[in-house]
Image (spheres, coloured by chain):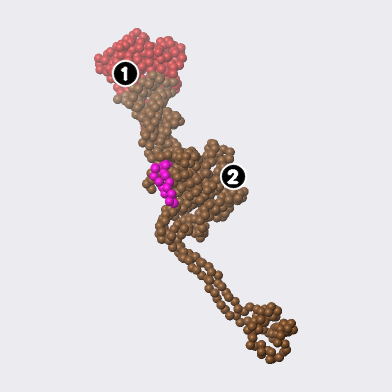
Chain colours: A red, B brown
Amino acid sequence: MVGTEAIPLGEPLPEHDAGTPLYELSGLERTFSKGGTVVHAVRGINLVIDRGEMLSLEGPSGSGKSTLLQLLGALDTPTGGSIRFGLRDLAAFGDKELTRIRAKEIGFVFQHFNLIPTLTAVENVAIAMFPNHVRPHERRERAEQLLNSVGLGHRLHQLPSRLSGGEQQRVAIARALANNPSVIIADEPTGNLDSETAKEVMAVLSSLHASGGVTIVIATHDEEVAKLTSRRVRIRDGAILEDTAA
Amino acid sequence: MFSLGYVSKELRRRWGRTLVTALGLAAGVGLVMGIIGVSEGLSDAQNRVLSPLGSVGTDIIVTRTIAPTTNQSTTTTTTTTPGFAGRGGAGGGGFFASGVAGATTSSQATALLNNNASVITDLAKLGKAGTKFTHDFFLPGTLITFPSVAVSDVAKIPGVTSAVGALSLQALHETGTVPTITDTVKTGGQTISTTVTPPKLTPAQTAAERTCIQKVLEKSFSSGSGGSHGTGPGSGRGGRGGTGGGFSGFASNPAVEKCLTPAQISYEQKVVVPEQTITRILKPPTTNTSTSSYTVAGVDPTNETTGLVTKAQLVSGTWFTSQPADEVLVNTAYASTKKLKVDGTVTINAKSYKIIGLVAPTLTGNVSDIYFPLSTVQSLASASGYVNEVLVAVKSSSDVSAVTAAIQKELPGATVLTSKSLADQVNGSLNNAHKLANDLGGALAVVVLLAAFLIAGLLTLSSVAKRVREIGSLRAIGWTRGEVVRQVMAETIGIGIIGGLIGVAIGVGVCAIIAAVGPGLSVTATGLSVGASTVGSLVGQTTTGTVTTIVHLSAPVHFATIALAFGGALVGGLVAGTIGGWRAARLAPASALRDLG
């Protein structure tokens, strides 16, 4: 079940040159064909994201914000231009390689938390390490550590249904950190939370960024959330409207 | 490959879905087990009932039968004399004497007809005309008897463990009034007188006669008879007065007699008609006689395991004792129609026989109504030393065909029936049900199994569809397509295992219920050519040679069935997993990000 190839967590992959930017997008295009009409979701975006940045993507629905996030998260491939992730061009990869990159280097936080409802908090975190062939007991240990670090040490064995929204999202953040990724892609992480809880979750993300140096990209339409990031990129109609550093 | 912890938690914590899918598979395989169980139960029942001759400890029955024709049966009615033994002997003699070439059909027919000759009996022997009579006649029907020596001949054949002779007869029970069938007419004894006119002599004959006589006369005169010397009319006339004596003396004179022409020697005769008594049949024996028939068999009372009836068939009472001559066993069916009970009696030809036991009929072999010790039947039928059936037990079933061939070689013209050939004559609901189970059961099992697979597949499909975000998230956080597919399949195989366990339990339960309820299945054996069943056609009666038995159905569960059922459930899980996995593989990782509400 579990391979022997246990990678040391927390070390950058060999091909990762710390000197290069994490992301380098140039002329990035993503078009969808739907019933004969072509939708240009992303049109010619140029963007560089450095390691350790905490960036927010803002834009209303239909702005192409989500598509851009999927491209950054290696969940989708562009139809034009290039998207360099470290030294690699994600546009050149197929599903297998992208899956591998996601498993090792990208953590995800979703609006709806997307926890496995049948698994406890600790199991939900541990399962993220499964594709990387981490031994079960190591998975478990690390999962517990991570949950402690997000303040859920007392709720390790609760099922998601027994956790509050904020707690679920903290479990999701712990899961996103499980494989010690280079970047955390967060899609509306506070979208399903009340403002109080949203603040808590943002605090967790901010402290992660501050302490660990992990790059965080947050897609949001919440001004309050965007304000907490060091760089704000506004998207309109598939293009960058505004790119401001705080 | 897949996360076992995740699988077990998925199955446990979504117990409802797991159980529904598993129950779908379980119901499928349980039903299949039930179908297989019933089918095997029917097979078992059929084997139990049909092959055995085993039920009477017999594997082969040797008889000598012939199918009567209309022609022959008319011939039979002209035969009038009883005398069973002689004709039995003739039949038996023919059986072995005809030897190598084998008895021809016509010689067999003759033997058979002789054996059945007493069908029409001289009823006058039963008493004076007009008196009431009750009498039982014993006929061998279509079976030709042969000497008991055949039994020991068969017993010597290699592979035969035992050979037992039996005499199976059709009994005609006749009651009625002795008819007037003859009258006696005395004829003859009269004396008839006739006068015969001798033919006229020719002149030459007359002359020769006269000359001859004259010579005789001259001779007698010359020898001196006094006074009558001399010739002349006077002397002639004078002699007239003494015509009588003279003539008589003349005629009685042998010398004179010699002179007579042969036609004149005798001309007067007395004719006496010989006295004789002629008995004529005035009417055919069609009186108020009523006839009923039943079957009897003579069995070896000392052999409890092989024969037309065995101790195993005993339902009440006891087996033949050491002095069995007046003891009988009665078939339960016959006993119930005739209201016979153990310790009761049956009366045959003014002799009482004690019913010592009731026996259940078997489907195969020759089922008789009353079983006597062999010697009793032989004496009732005046057929001492003869049997008409040899029941053979062989060492193993694989010997049957070899022994059959050996018997046919040893006893040419014999009909050798094996349990298999008898089983082919058996039908009834058991047979039909078994056929149904075989024909439809298989199809039903396949349909049920496919339906179960389909249900499991659809449930898995819907489960995967409901878990789009969950599975998409797994893909997003780095699970490969293969890992997700294997995960889904591992889950459904787990469901298959659970379904298999429940299904086996259901199947075992269903089979146990079937066995407990044990629906009765009737088995009817008809048209067995063994025994006296076809004698009816000889005497213009209809006898039904059918036996019906009720067999209780059981549904055995064999290990193979359990393995098959469990395997079926696993395959069902695999099929469902393949369907679900295919669906899961098609989920884009980005679906995790979609707002699905």
Q: Main secondary structure of the magenta part?
A: strand
Q: Residue under label 2, please give it.
A: B410
Q: Position of residue B349 (x, y in %)?
A: 44, 51
Using the rendered image, report if marks 2 and 1 lie on a common chain: no
Q: Residue under label 1, please give it.
A: A159
Determine the secondary structure under disc 1. Answer: loop
- The residue segment tinted magenta is B342-360
Determine the secondary structure under disc 2. Answer: helix
Q: Name the image quarter holding the C terminus of chain B.
A: top left
- Per the model, the C-alpha gap separating discs 2 and 1 is 87 Å
Residue type for callout 2? Glu
Does residue A38 sit above or below A179 in this rendering?
Answer: below
**Residue B298, label in figure:** none
Q: Position of residue B309 (x, y in %)?
A: 46, 42
Does residue B327 sit above or below A67 in this rendering?
Answer: below
* Foreground pick, A153 / B18: B18
Q: Position of residue A79 (x, y in %)?
A: 41, 24
Q: Is residue B358 magenta?
A: yes
Q: Is residue A230 magenta?
A: no
Residue depth check, mark 2 versus mark 1: number of the one nearer the observer? 2
Q: Within 10 Å of the Cα at label 2, are there few (<14), some (14-19), or many (20+) other Cα atoms? A: some
- Name the side, left or right, on which B535 lies relative to A116: right
Does residue B60 sit above or below A184 in this rendering?
Answer: below
